[in-house]
Image (cartoon, rainbow, N blue to C red):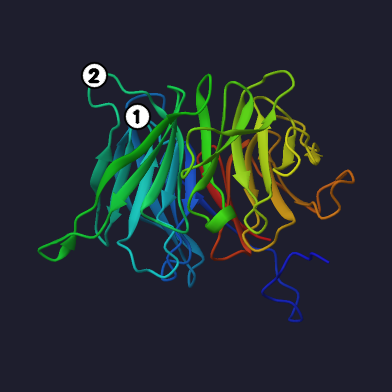
Amino acid sequence: MCALPSQSQGGPPKRKEIYKYEAPLCVYSMNWSIRPDKRFRLALGSFVEEYNNKVQIVSLDEDTSEFTSKGTFDHPYPTTKIMFIPDTKGVFPDLLATSGDYLRVWRVGDTETRLECLLNNNKNSDFCAPLTSFDWNEVDPNLLGTSSIDTTCTIWGLETGQVLGRVNVVSGHVKTQLIAHDKEVYDIAFSRAGGGRDMFASVGADGSVRMFDLRHLEHSTIIYEDPQHHPLLRLGWNKQDPNYLATMAMDALEVIILDVRVPCTPVARLNNHRACVNGIAWAPHSSCHICTAADDHQALIWDIQQMPRAIEDPILAYTAAGEINQIQWSSTQPDWIAICYNNCLEILRV
């Protein structure tokens, strides 16, 4: 059996817990901190259709049950994605990365967050090709990958080692850039397969899912192509079984589950949403649970263990007060899922 693991099995029935934070601006990007000493810290990126945007770091005070702002900094254009360094042991500097016009790496301090480096792969031009997304490698936190509207993916190497004075200086360099798709690339994600360092996949406006290996970049594998060539917007790898990944097409009401061993044929379709899907989050601790979120205000958790038999209904549903545009499942606290809608962040105990 593949039950959703719980921290409170056998104890008293756990109460439904929801904590809410209202940000000063409409929120789009959001993610959990991964450091063990910052349990309920999240970063939020604003969505304002102009140059001046903000990133805010918030933390839940477990004594008062209230979110408090730990700091806000300016960001040019909205952040398309935001991630804390995947550092479960707290051995790296406390870093945060954002994508937008460029990839930026920030150092989070107690009093302020400051820009450590701006990674620009387009030195010869006054124009930049905006980044649609990025991923931070969990096995090797010195590796990041970005996806761009210019059809390319870029793999960056990060150096966090040099010490000047008493502070580690963070810098980055291009390890490789490749033309990944025929059109814009909309998302990139590292796989845990083969050691977790070298394999990644991307999706894009050409409607395909493609898989790459950093050791053999001369060719890629097409995992799936949308029959109508609709753009694919997001992808996510199963955190426990690297054979499975999920993707979704633009304006689609369903999420498609793929098995890399059976290319081009979805093994499941999750299609209970009544408006377009905006987000996918696999459970960090279970190979057969995934959460989807959509414009129908719903976040749905699915148990997919009976694949390839049809998955009819989700096992849990939560209805928010607005269209959910972002969902993240906490990797260090698997009881908690975070969602964003309008100017609100909510974290939900599952």
SS for dot 2: loop
Q: Is residue 313 left or right of residue 181?
A: right
* Type of amino acid under label 2: Asp
Residue 229's disc is: none
Residue positioned 57% across, 55% down in the render: 194
Residue 224 drawn above or below residue 114: above
Q: Quadrant of the C terminus?
A: bottom right
Circle 1: residue type: Asp
**Which residue corresponds to mark 1?**
101
Q: Nearer the viewer, residue 181 or 17?
A: 181
Name the side, left or right, on which 331 lies relative to 146: right
Q: Residue at x 75, y 34 (%)?
A: 254
Return the x and y of residue 315 as percentages of the image width and height: 81, 54
User: Residue at 74% across / 79% down in the picture?
Assistant: 12
Percent position (x, y) of residue 312? 88, 44
Q: Describe residue 151's horizontal placement relative to residue 255 as left or right.
A: left
Q: Is residue 299 left or right of residue 112?
A: right
* Residue farthest to the bottom, as pictured: 11
Q: Position of residue 251 (x, y in %)?
A: 67, 25
- The answer to whether one can see residue 24 in this image is no
Point 63% across, 24% down: residue: 207
Judge depth for marks 1 and 2 and give the one in front: 2
Tag on residue 126?
2
Badge 2: residue crowd in 10 Å (few <14, some 14–19, many ≥20): few
Mark 1 to mark 2 CA distance (whole Å): 12 Å
